[in-house]
Amino acid sequence: MAQNKNQEREAREARDRLKKYNARQAVHTHQVTRRRRDNIYAIAGVVVIAAIAAVTQIFYFTSGPGAPTPEPSSSVSSTPTPTPTPEANVGDVPSPDAAEARTWTGKLTLNNTKLGIELDGAAAPQAVASVVKDITDGYYVDKTCHRLVNQDTFGVLQCGSLDGTGAGDPDYAFGPIENAPADGIYPAGSIAMARSDSAYSNGHQFFIVFKDTTLPSTTGGYSVIGSVTSGLDDLVSGIVAGGIADDAEDGAPVIPTTITSVTIK
């Protein structure tokens, strides 16, 4: 009889121990689950905060008060969007020998403004050979001067685009860059070739510098082919003084400008 009571007591104690163990396991499992859930919430919170910060920063630096102020272009490109050009001549480019290593003289008329010009075939033989060919072939007559830039240290009138928009001729390009100022300073009266990103992207377009102009020499510069010998003041007081469309510092001249004639000898 005593043995049965002992067995019952032991069984009851075993049940109690099992119940307590199960309770402890339940508490432990709940704590583990809660910690895992809390960790997930914490990670999600960090991700959301980081995303909000990133979006805020992007807005600030692109559309908000931290957005950079656009700066005027300080280059003379022959295409609205420069595209890679092969490092070789394209099309019917004349030999540099055609420049005859001599000085060519002539007259360039823009609207009614007459400019005396000289081209230096010794200093820029390839570019001068190309321009002389374009003049003798009649390419430039009726072409426009599509771009006028008038800034403190940058004053040019750019002419000769194939279609009047500033686009280059995809079938004609040459190089290399010749007679570019090492210091990047182009004196008033200089005539130089416009180009895009390659040394072999010179084409038909040229620009007339009407005030001392600084252009980046780190890009290789621009081929200076000659100079305006007379009429530069008339150009400044006429076409340049007429201003730039939309009161900009770089754009189409308010006075539509056309190459009405050009001669060379």
Image: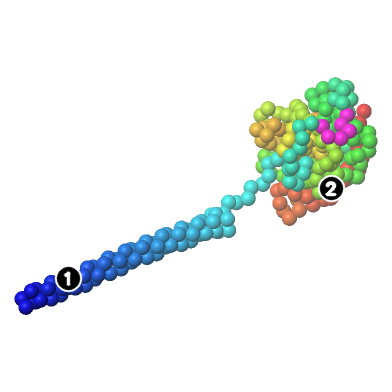
Whichever of labels 1 and 2 marks the residue nearer the N terminus, that label is: 1
Amino acid carrying label 2: it is Gly
User: Magenta segment, principal secondary structure?
Assistant: loop
193 shown above or below 145: above
Residue in view at x 80 percent, y 46 percent: 166
Q: Which residue is mark 1?
A: 14
Residue in view at x 81 percent, y 42 percent: 168
Residue in view at x 15 percent, y 75 percent: 12
Answer few, some or many: residues within 10 Å of disc 2's Cα (few below 14, many 20 plus, some between 14 and 19): some
- Residue 41: percent from the left, percent from the top? 40, 64
Secondary-structure class at tag 1: helix
Secondary-structure class at tag 2: loop
Quarter residue 148 falls in: top right
Marks 1 and 2: which is nearer the front?
Answer: 1
Q: Which residue is mark 2?
A: 164
The residue stretch that appears in magenta:
89-94
Whether residues under marks 1 and 2 lie with C-beta atoms below 8 angstroms apart, the answer is: no
Task: Compare residues 256 and 9 and report the one nearer the observer.
Answer: 9
Task: Compare residues 235 and 144 and report the one nearer the observer.
Answer: 144
1 shown above or below 30: below
